[in-house]
Amino acid sequence: MKHVAADVEQLREQFRVFLRTKMYRNTQERFRVLERVAELDRHFTADELYVYMNTCGDKISRATVYSTLDLLTRCNILVKHRFQGDSATYELAARKPNHDHLICRDCGHMIEFQESALLALQDSIAERYGMRALRHSLQIFAQCRDQEHCTHRRHGEDSTTSDD
Amino acid sequence: MKHVAADVEQLREQFRVFLRTKMYRNTQERFRVLERVAELDRHFTADELYVYMNTCGDKISRATVYSTLDLLTRCNILVKHRFQGDSATYELAARKPNHDHLICRDCGHMIEFQESALLALQDSIAERYGMRALRHSLQIFAQCRDQEHCTHRRHGEDSTTSDD
DNA sequence: GTTCTTGCAAACCCTTTGCACGTCT
DNA sequence: AGACGTGCAAAGGGTTTGCAAGAAC
């Protein structure tokens, strides 16, 4: 599932154009973050990336990681999610286009799904209010029908406090 | 748009049953929070409620506000959202059932919409993965077609850092 | 050489927690 | 009386910021 070199070069170019347009500088740190991020075929948090990079030999500060993740999100290379109550998670926008998330209320397991009908729906809803849809974020909270497969069940929780 | 007394009494009963079931106590503070919350026909944050109550003459601590909002969410009287990067917002679940949010990327204006097709869609998607849908959260990020009406435009921002 | 970026640690915001006191049962 | 809830302030976790040193232009 690793991305091939061509993809990374394309992302580098996209980032270069963005930085040039915004008059931001081409620093080694920014491109090193892009490099590592492109290797991750999954959701990750800023801190996970910080730890990962410093383990891989890329010495970099938390401040730079956060700031670069913000740049990468602003130029659409990354998508930022804010599931549950914890920290923000990021993922490559090109990883799996237009997918949404189905989350088990009991074990927290997350399934990524693609549903083409949602694109048409987001457009028609925005249209209804005189707007032009750019993107959407949908999470469906559900329960495993087969409770046996729900291994990480939480203690005696009720309806759940999890949120958008 | 204020809720009538009957609604509030129903909520009180719902809360009473929940507390009894869970062996939690019926305290004045908890019911005072419910009272105030029932007056608000909009989204609010924990801190807004804290300030509001202490302005209205209800002396109450932040800790109690947070803890009671959690109880009210757990018994489905409130729904908790986590839009953007800021703090969590709450609203009465009975206020406007099954609505989702259309958010202007430029001015942040939020439109609440109801789209019945989403219920069927959430169910069919969950079904596809052997799960039973409980609820969903959808935000559509869009742009005003008529930029004139977009009064609170942000400075030179790009694609946006806002998230789920 | 000037301006922007980095790194560090401290500050920040929202939320949770520890503890002593008060309240519910 | 005993257990639980409240209030306060302090701690906590994730993220941002101020400032001096360093890199980009």
Image: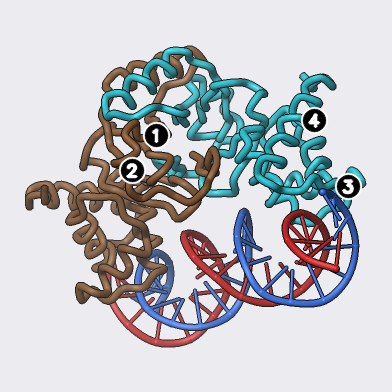
Chain colours: A brown, B cyan, C blue, D red
In the rendered image, residue B54, in percent from the top left (x then y), is placed at 86, 49
Q: Are marks 2 and 1 in contact (CB under 8 Å)?
A: yes
Q: Residue at x 29, y 38 (%)?
A: A111
Reading the image, the residue beneath label 2 is: A150
* Marks 1, 3: nearer the viewer: 1
Q: Position of residue B69 (x, y in %)?
A: 68, 44
What separation in Å lies between label 2 and label 1 (alpha carbons)?
9 Å
Disc 4 secondary structure class: helix
Circles 3 and 2 in contact, beta carbons < 8 Å: no
Q: Residue at x 36, y 50 (%)?
A: A152
- Name the residue located 57 percent from the left edge and 49 percent from the top edge: B86
SS class, disc 2: loop
Q: Amino acid at mark 1?
A: Gln
Q: Residue, x 38% and y 21% (percent of image)?
A: B123
The Cα atoms of the two marked residues, 2 and 4, are separated by 39 Å
Residue position for label 3 = B58
**Helix, strand or loop for disc 3:** loop
Check if mark 2's residue and mark 4's residue have beta carbons within 8 Å: no
Q: Which mark is residue B39?
A: 4
Of A25 and B11, nearer the camera is B11
Amino acid type, callout 3? Asp
Q: Earlier in the sequence, mark 2 or mark 1?
A: 1
Whether discs 2 and 1 lie on one chain: the answer is yes
Amino acid carrying mark 2 in the image? Cys
Labelled pair 1, 3 in contact (Cβ < 8 Å): no
- Per the image, the residue denoted by label 1 is A143
